[in-house]
Image: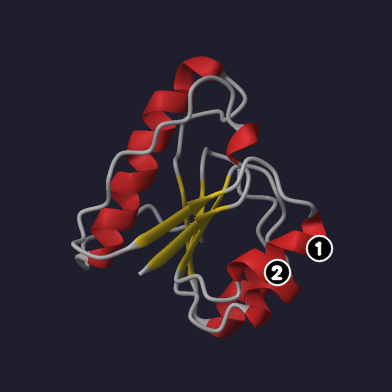
Amino acid sequence: MNVVMIDSNNLPGEVDFPELDLDKFGWQQYLNLEQDEVEERCWRADIIVSAAMPVDHIVIDKAFKLKLIVAAGKNYEHIDMAAAQKRGIKVCHVPELDCTDKNNTPEICSQTVETINAFIHDRPINLVD
């Protein structure tokens, strides 16, 4: 399972994601990629995590293993929902938590990983409609 966090710099405060509930996984965390770098870094991702960096149709189309996109915070306007739906990729977010408030960063990190763990173990997650 490959997880790519594409813009941890968009979360203020200390960004510390807990471990996933998997024996074998890869977690790549980038502070802030340029838009043209996102496609290159995510093409093998099973899961993409983004606080604000756009995940557009180009990224979604190139990420051949992609199953889940997690918006790290309550906002998910930066995710191309139509492209995700077309590919059957689930999109979820961390409702009620503003990713621009540094007081929310620890809870966003925790809930993001909880969401990924729930997805991995086929439990309910906060899907975006």
Between residues 102 and 83, which one lies in front from this camera angle? Answer: 102
- Classify mark 1: residues with Cα within 10 Å, few (<14), some (14-19) or many (20+): few
Q: Quadrant of the N terminus?
A: bottom left
Q: Residue at x 27, y 51 (%)?
A: 20
Residue tagged by mark 2? 39
The image's colouring method is secondary structure
Q: Residue at x 59, y 73 (%)?
A: 84
Between residues 3 and 99, which one lies in front from this camera angle? Answer: 3
Q: Residue at x 19, y 65 (%)?
A: 121
Q: Is residue 108 left or right of residue 101?
A: left
- Classify mark 2: residues with Cα within 10 Å, few (<14), some (14-19) or many (20+): many
The answer to whether the residues at label 1 and label 2 have Cβ atoms under 8 Å apart is yes
Figure check: 84 above or below 91: below
Helix, strand or loop at mark 2: helix
Residue tagged by mark 1? 36
Q: Position of residue 77 (x, y in %)?
A: 68, 50
Residue type at numbered disc 2:
Glu
Residue type at numbered disc 1:
Asp
Q: Residue at x 40, y 36 (%)?
A: 109
Between residues 102 and 6, which one lies in front from this camera angle? Answer: 6
Figure check: 46 above or below 101: below
Q: Position of residue 11 (x, y in %)?
A: 58, 30
Q: Position of residue 124 (x, y in %)?
A: 26, 59
Between residues 126 and 28, which one lies in front from this camera angle? Answer: 28
Q: Is residue 16 left or right of residue 5?
A: left
